[in-house]
Image (tube, coloured by chain):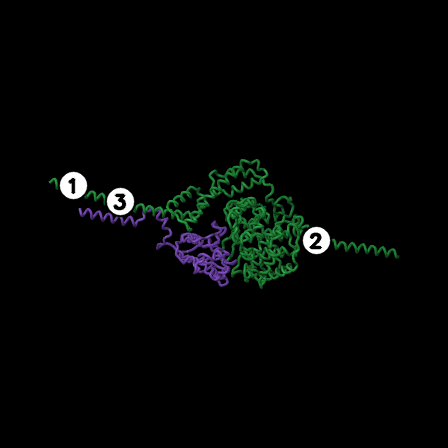
Amino acid sequence: MKKTKMINKFFAGVIAAVITATTIFDGQTAVWATDATTETETTTESGVEASDSPLSQEIQEYKNTIDGILAWAKSANGITADQPLFSGSFLKNAGTTAGDWYAIALSRLGYEEDYQAYLSALTTYVEDKYKKEDKLDATKATEWHRVSLAYLSTGGDPTYAGTDKDGKNINLIADGIYDFELNQGKALDAQGINGLVWALITLDSMRYDVPMNTTVTRTQLIQQILDRQNEDGGFALSGIESDPDVTAMVLQALAIYTGDNAGYAVTNDEMVSMSPYLMEDLEEAIDKALSYLSSMQQPNGDFLAWGTSNCETVCQTIIALCGLGIHPLEDERFIKDGNTLVDALMAYELEDGGFAHSLAASTMADGMASGQALCALTALCRYMYYGVSLYDYRNWGDAADTDVYTINMFTSEPVIMQAAVVFEAADEEAYKNIPTELTTEYTAEVNRLYNKLKNAENKDDYAHVLAGLRQMKEEIAEIQQEIDDINREIETNLYGDGELDAKAAVQLKSRVEYLSEYDQTQIEGYEDLLIEEKQLISDKRGQLLSILGVAAVVLIVGSVFLNMRHRKRAKKQLEIEE
Amino acid sequence: MKKDLLMLAFAVLIIAVLLSGTKIQSVEEYYLTHSEDITEDSQTVTVSIECKTVLDNWENLSEELKEGDYIPEDGVILEPKEYVLRNGDTAFDLLKRVTRYERIQMEIQGADENIYETAYIQGINYLYEFSCGPLSGWMYQVNDAYQGVGCSRCELKDGDKLTFIYTCDLGRDIGGNYEEGNINE
């Protein structure tokens, strides 16, 4: 009997031990899982597997709307439906608000696009801007932030964005965040809270580290943002009158510190635990901001800002909720009278597929509104289908570690953006189609082909093409230089403090006429130059005629006088003879 | 002989008068150099540019602009003046022409005119967005009402009044608070 009791006790002990061990180990697994997220960059944020089922009706509708925006954007930029959006004249928007949000959204969706071409145009834009004193902008740090996200979106690296005029590397993350004040002489928030918000979003996009000695740390950025929260829970660009648009963007920046990563800042090297007091304040701030936003939502699901509704506010709110892991269509706080944020968003959709900025003032589709609508739909798809946030750029999925890729939201296939560049026959064809009479109209195309071939695996097979492209780049650079010089002279002498005389005007005009027809369109104020030149010439002509006139008068008077004298003498002669 | 002299003097006088007062131009030249002249049947728009709010926010103004004469004493960069309105001109077209004609510095973003995006006025007379605090920048009105569209989207009509106004408070200090029903719907 005693033996059985002992055996029972023994087994009970074993069972107890096993149970205890399992509980402990489960806890351990959770920690390991979070560690795993930081060490390898191939697991999904929430571990959710993409669904194998066909697209749900909802997602299909979103895809249709997305395709509509894409179609509108193409036609608005004179691009045919079969061409990628990132081509032709659209590439002129690379580096600006008008283009970057499309690159960001389409890349996050995993659409097939010419990311190479966009990255090339982006690099050219940045390198050109860096030649000037203000670089990307005199005051707005957000220019660096958006452009950095655009680089990441197209397979580039904003920490190696190009070379400046001294041949040094351009690091947009450094220049736009922790070195911004040093370089530009303006605080990050000189443009308002946006400078802080987007610095944080960009910093966390790839979990970048900040250097040891900087004061621009995540803690500092979060603290500065929280300090600006208004009484009503909302945030303003600057001041005490809250704005739902700005509040939504603040939420996007703070969202990363909640959920799976609550209390932690995830960096490239480690997971840093943040001050628990700060994190408590952060959670509280988020709650208050959400209450504010919810209270600002109107019965039709939309928001009222400055007495009117606009597309962008709805978009930013959708993105914010997705980032926080709040389902925009299911959370009661954001459904009013049965109307959701998505209902409000779709009200701005126009027949041609584009989105309007506001219904009151314009029924014409707008590039910025459409771009933000695209981002909102992207955030929705990423959240609903994969549980991933819009601005998380870490690789996850099945492509090789060395590839730079994105995941197609609708097929779950990886879309390679910059790996294994191969110069193709079509590219050589494009090269041959560039006319010998170069104009700046071909700058984008030449740069695209050159950058592609330069990085191509098979570039040795096309050595002659590379040399040819290099030659073209030089020629175009010379033409561009001439255009810039002429523009500067017109700027100074025609509109500024300089003076223009007839001779200089004629010279300037002939320089312009020497340019090709396309390049002439790049001259600012050509019409005014023509007017001024004609004016100066006719003035000169007037002067000349006056001189001639006087000379003619003198001659006439002189000859008449002589004639008179001659006749007088002749008369006298006759008189003498008589 | 006296008659000869008299006739001669007369001829000389006429030639002198004609030459001093006449500009000899081709027809093309005439139209080109007189395109800005206002005649009875030309369509016109009155344009003005002012930055009076800066005077109330002097502490926020960037240091470089405090010296020199960047900010006029009365805050008026351009007094209301009539300009020729050409067919299809937008508020942006007018601003471009006016600032060139009057030699006022201007910087713009997005000058490529297409239906995709609108032009953005970054600075006029060296006064830029953010030059007077984070909520400062340029806005414009047509007939004393804000248009709610970018200036390159706003077509003007004969007799319109176009004003470019600098705000230091996101439009709230210049009646841009739409809740007052100021927006042109």
* Type of amino acid at the residue the image marks with label 1: Ala
Mark 3 secondary-structure assignment: helix
| Label 1 neighbour load within 10 Å: few <14, some 14-19, many 20+ | few
Residue with the most extreme left position: A578
Q: The purple chain is which one?
A: B
The quadrant holding residue A222 is bottom right
Look at the picture and state if A460 lies above or below B161: above
Q: Distance between the residues labelled 2 and 3?
A: 104 Å
The answer, for residue A381, to whether it is visible in the render is no
- Disc ID at residue A570: 1
Q: What element carries label 1?
A: helix
Q: Which of marks 1 and 3 is nearer the N terminus?
A: 3
The amino acid on which the numbered mark 2 sits, given as a three-letter code, is Val
Same-chain check, marks 2 and 3:
yes
Residue A426 higher or lower than B14, as above or below: above
In the shown orientation, is residue A128 left or right of residue A490?
right
* Chain identity of mark 2: A
Q: Give the colour in which the image draws chain A.
A: green
Which chain does the numbered disc 3 sit on? Answer: A
Tell me if residue A69 comes above or below residue A572 in the rendering: below
Label ID, residue A178? none
| Crowd class of label 2 (few under 14; some 14 to 19; many from 20; radius 10 Å) | few
Residue B126, percent from left and from top: 46, 54
Where disc 2 sits, the SS reads: helix
**Closer to the N terminus: mark 2 or mark 1?**
2
Picture quadrant of residue A503 = top left
Q: Mark 2 points at which residue?
A: A31
Tell me which amino acid carries mark 3: Ala
